[in-house]
Image (cartoon, rainbow, N blue to C red):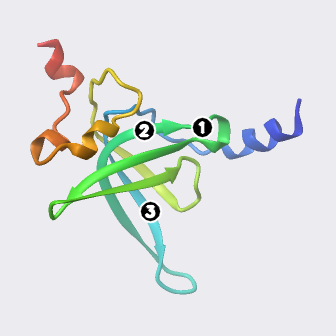
């Protein structure tokens, strides 16, 4: 086995939920507040992109806060991520949802869920 793949296999042992582009997720990251204390800071939004393979998977989460769009890129297996909670599962036909950057209001956050589409 390749040495790089062995190292990546060690990183990928951290359990993360399966989510796709279009899903609304809440990412809880660790913020250090002292030498031995940290707090969890939530970042909730729509996953607009996923890239990379193996231990180098990144995903971009976009939220609208006070009328301003905020995007943040997270490495999936980062030690700073405590957990990822899936709020809502979305049905999209694109791999990258960069078109949401030009949308305003509910159009920027409303993505039909798979359950709503089935009805």
Return the residue at label 3: 29
Left/right of residue 67 with respect to residue 24 in the rendered view: left
Mark before the other along the chain sequence, 2 or 3: 3
Q: Which residue is drawn at 51% across and 86% down?
A: 34
Q: In which quarter of the image is the C terminus?
A: top left
**Callout in the foreground (1, 3):** 1
Q: Count residues near mark 3 (Cα–Cα under 10 Å), then give few for <14, some for 14-19, many for 20+.
A: many
Marks 1 and 2 close (CB-CB < 8 Å):
no
Instruction: Say if residue 83 shows up in the picture.
Output: yes
Spatial CA span between label 1 and label 3:
20 Å
Above or below residue 95? Residue 67 is below
Q: Which residue is drawn at 14% across and 47% down?
A: 104
Give the farthest residue toward the top: 118
Question: Residue 99, image x and y in percent?
Answer: 28, 37
Q: What element carries label 2?
A: strand
Question: Residue 12, image x and y in percent?
Answer: 65, 41
Q: Is mark 3 on a helix, strand or loop?
A: strand
Q: Which mark is residue 52?
A: 1
Return the residue at label 2: 49
Question: Which one is in front, 37 or 62?
Answer: 62
Question: Which one is in front, 5 or 71?
Answer: 71
Q: Count residues near mark 2 (Cα–Cα under 10 Å), then give few for <14, some for 14-19, many for 20+.
A: some
Mark before the other along the chain sequence, 1 or 3: 3
């Amino acid at each position: 086995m390749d040495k790089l793949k062995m190292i990546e296999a060690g990183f990928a042992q951290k359990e993360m939920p399966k989510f796709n582009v279009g899903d609304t997720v809440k990412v809880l990251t660790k913020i250090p507040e002292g030498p031995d204390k940290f707090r969890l800071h939530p970042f909730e939004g729509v996953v607009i992109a996923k890239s990379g393979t193996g231990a180098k998977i990144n995903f971009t989460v976009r939220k609208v806060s006070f009328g301003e769009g905020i995007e943040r890129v997270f490495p999936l297996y980062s030690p700073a991520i405590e957990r990822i909670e899936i709020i809502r599962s979305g049905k999209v036909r694109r791999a990258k949802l960069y078109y949401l950057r030009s949308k305003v209001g509910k159009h920027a956050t409303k993505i039909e869920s798979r359950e709503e589409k089935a009805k």
